[in-house]
Amino acid sequence: MADKPSRALVLYGDGLASLISTSQSHLHSFASLSSCGFLSLRSPPSQDSIVDSRAALDFAQLLDAYDFYIAKKQQSSDAGSTTDLEQSAVPELSKRFIGLRAGIFSRFPSVSSLASDLSLSPLPLEETELPSKLLALLGFSEGNVLEASEYDLLLLHITSEMLKTQKVKSTADWLDHLVGGILESATPGSAVSSRLHMSVVLSYEKLSEVARVIP
């Protein structure tokens, strides 16, 4: 365990798993240095009264807030609902993890709304010089670790819809470039790498995509 508090960065590639190929060298390099595994998420409920994006449903599960999110949607879609949000409520992240300051970048309103309920601060996404900006919010500057940071945890929700620039061929390439920029600042043995915990989570948008990749 680290002898000082670390800061965390989570890059969530929503629906990008099937787009990753051998050309994304930074992602493969990061995977070779990391622990890798699979997560299995529950299918959304079949009730017609619950209508929302798959992204928000998956995100709720990743934050262990799925039951609360479903109960909230049931209540908002049915005026006569007797759903008890108190029973499904989960503590805010700041309470679950002793004052954790967390922020999220997402262009999905439903994801940002859920994040706010869990005490994550929605932040505007500026794609220029993103690696250095993310690290700065976590208290890293020019290879140094600052004593104070604005956030302890940042979560970046990356989807194919967010790609605005034509300088890269796909969102997968954009993510690969972002990972490369962060790895450049957090080389093994550096002060930044000893205090930064970075995770990359990739999901499949549809079950049929998994069938094409995993025989």
Image: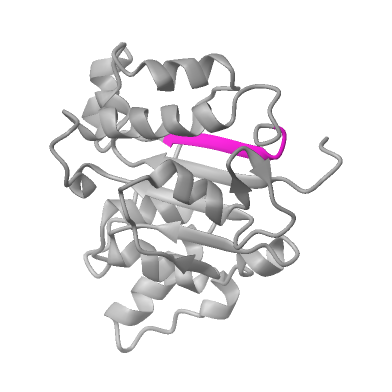
Which image quarter holds the N terminus?
Answer: top right
Q: Which residues are magenta?
A: 194-201
Give the dominant element type of the magenta stretch: helix, strand or loop: strand
Residue that protrudes farthest toward the bottom in the picture: 80
In the image, is residue 23 above or below residue 199? above
Residue drawn at point x = 51 percent, y = 78 percent: 85
Residue that protrudes farthest toward the front in the picture: 142
Q: Is residue 187 left or right of residue 1?
A: left
In the image, is residue 134 above or below residue 36? below
Residue drawn at point x = 74 percent, y = 55 percent: 147
Q: Could you tell me residue 185's position as x and y percent?
A: 54, 32
Q: Quadrant of residue 4?
A: top right
Queried whether the magenta region covers residue 140, the answer comes back as: no
In the image, is residue 17 above or below residue 104? above
Q: Quadrant of residue 86?
A: bottom right
Tell which of 22 and 165 is nearer to you. 165
